[in-house]
Amino acid sequence: MKSNGKKKADFLILLFALALTALGLLMIFSASAPYAKSRFGDIYYFIKDQMVAALIGITVMMIVSLLNYDLFRKFAWFIFAGGLVLLLLTYVPGISVEHNDARRWINIGFEFQPSELYKLAFIIFMARIIIYFKEKQKPLIGYITAIVITLGSAFIIYKQPHLSAAVIITLIGFVIIYAGGAKLKYLIITVVPVTALAAVGAFTYDYMKDRIMAWIDPFAYPSVEGYQVIQSLYAIASGGLFGVGLGKSTQKFLYIPEPQNDFIFSIIAEELGYIGVFLVITLFCMLLWRGIRIAIFCEDLFGTLLALGITALIFVQAALNIAVVTGLVPNTGIALPFFSAGGTSIVMFLTEIGILLNISKQPEKKRELKA
């Protein structure tokens, strides 16, 4: 039962989120200008939409920060059902939209990517499910249910195909399940076969198999699957310590395909150097620190799991994107939070920051992350 006393919202997490958003807008304009001019004849093509989306996101963030997060607990089932329906629409001809052999988008008057909304719906529902079965004192049934929801969600997204989002959903699910009280040995028993199935599944699609081979030796595939990674590494290497200067990237001039998207981090490294890279990574680490602190000091378990899930989503996705761009993991096609162009993405990430702000205003009561 929560007390009524409230405190001020966590100013630092707001500051870090706004800093990432502002820096992201700056880098999207810089990275996208040549491609936008070449394809659409307008260097402002991407930044105009991104600025509108960012303003919408900030507005939604401020509104959500004023709404008690208990609303998400009460409507968790409806939120999840809505997110699931939107996700399944990517399989409906006439509504789903295909880009680069993947059906990850739908068009209902405007085009967006349902998986971005589903990630938040999934986090809310997972937190609610764990609380529900704790109250019923049925931990084993709760564990099995949470695992089924996690793996089922990952499978639906994987079949789009969208391997990186499936991996993120799985990792977040396991984080929430463990923090919700699951025994580590149960998770280990579950993770081993799931990892084996994921490895097999990665070779189901030819493009995934090709990306894995290109990851092992990108220079053996310089004109196909290894091309993006090679150009990305060139950009990062040429940036050096201080970078070539804002707006002066060479690789963004159609060497890196659509540089405002998944590989924008390499443009950051080229233009702003390792100093800029350090700044970006530091800002994400600061978000991680404040998010975990909010989770630890939340008064009830639902808020703890919700804050932890959102924090894990932002940090895991950022870490995975940076790992892809630097060649540490195979290219999976994952956006960099707050930086990659995409209206749905920036609106959702700012909405999630709004939820963290709301949770941070609640009375503090220190708890262990694992209940």
Image (spheres, rainbow, N blue to C red):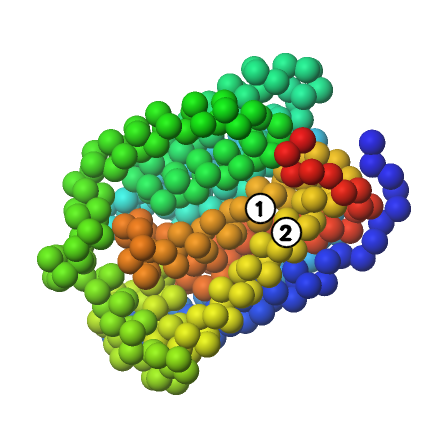
- Residue 132 is drawn in which quadrant? top right
- The numbered dot on residue 310 is 1
Left/right placement of residue 127 relative to residue 316 reads right
Q: How many marks?
A: 2
Left/right placement of residue 213 relative to residue 197 reads left
User: Measuring 29% from the left and 78% from the top, which residue is drawn there?
Assistant: 238
User: Measuring 78% from the left and 51% from the top, which residue is drawn there?
Assistant: 361
**Which of 255/10 is in front?**
10
How far across and down, in percent of the image, does residue 224 sit?
14, 57
**Quadrant location of the C terminus in the rendered image:** top right
Disc 2 is placed on an element classified as helix
Q: Is residue 78 above or below residue 68?
A: above
- Residue 142 is drawn in which quadrant? top right
User: Measuring 58% from the left and 46% from the top, which residue is drawn there?
Assistant: 310
Outermost front residue: 185
**Which of 36/310 is in front?**
310
| Type of the residue with mark 1 | Ile
Classify 10 Å Cα crowding around label 2: few (below 14), some (14-19), many (20 and above).
Answer: many
Classify 10 Å Cα crowding around label 1: few (below 14), some (14-19), many (20 and above).
Answer: many
Are circles 1 and 2 on residues that touch, CB within 8 Å? yes
**Quadrant location of the N terminus in the rendered image:** top right
- The numbered dot on residue 249 is none
- For the question of whether residue 355 can be seen, the reply is no
| Type of the residue with mark 2 | Gly
Disc 1 to disc 2, C-alpha distance: 8 Å
Disc 1 is placed on an element classified as helix
How far across and down, in percent of the image, does residue 266 sit?
34, 68
How far across and down, in percent of the image, does residue 16 sit?
61, 65
Q: Which numbered disc flags the more N-terminal residue, 1 or 2?
A: 2
**Which of 296/97 is in front?**
296
How far across and down, in percent of the image, does residue 264 sit?
37, 66
According to the picture, the residue beneath numbered tag 2 turns out to be 291
